[in-house]
Image (spheres, rainbow, N blue to C red):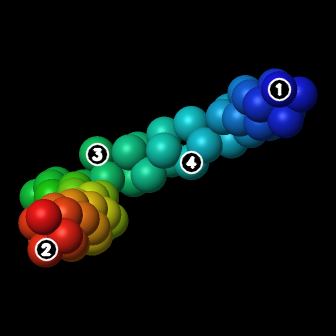
Amino acid sequence: MKRHYVLMLFAFLFSGYLNAQCAMCRAVLESEEGQTTAEGVNDGIMYLMAIPYLLMAGIGFLIYWNFFRRKKETE
């Protein structure tokens, strides 16, 4: 239980630094005329965000598939 509180404390203390970095990136990307770099950064973020979810979904599906296949074999 104490470990949970310590983790929450660290997340709260260091969240200010994360917001500062995001604001800096946003300011640089908003200052561009064509907004092509901003679109590229947004696409890159979506790509990097989607890959772990797809991997976890694939692993979950394989575990689910193997569990029910073994269950049918034993019946």
Disc on the earlier residue, 1 or 2? 1
Provide the residue designation for mark 4. Answer: 21
Q: Secondary structure at mark 2?
A: helix
Q: Quadrant of residue 20?
A: top right
What's the residue type where badge 1 is placed?
Answer: Met
Instruction: Mark yes or no: residue 10 visible.
Output: yes
What's the residue type where badge 4 is placed?
Answer: Gln
Provide the residue designation for mark 3. Answer: 30
Separation of residues labelled 1 and 4 (CA atoms): 31 Å
Separation of residues labelled 1 and 2 (CA atoms): 42 Å
- Circle 1 residues within 10 Å: few <14, some 14–19, many ≥20: few
Foreground tag (1 vs 4):
1
> Are the residues tagged 4 and 3 within 8 Å (C-beta)?
no
In the foreground, 12 or 16:
12
Q: Is residue 15 above or below residue 41?
A: above
Q: Is residue 41 left or right of residue 39?
A: right
Which quadrant: the C terminus? bottom left
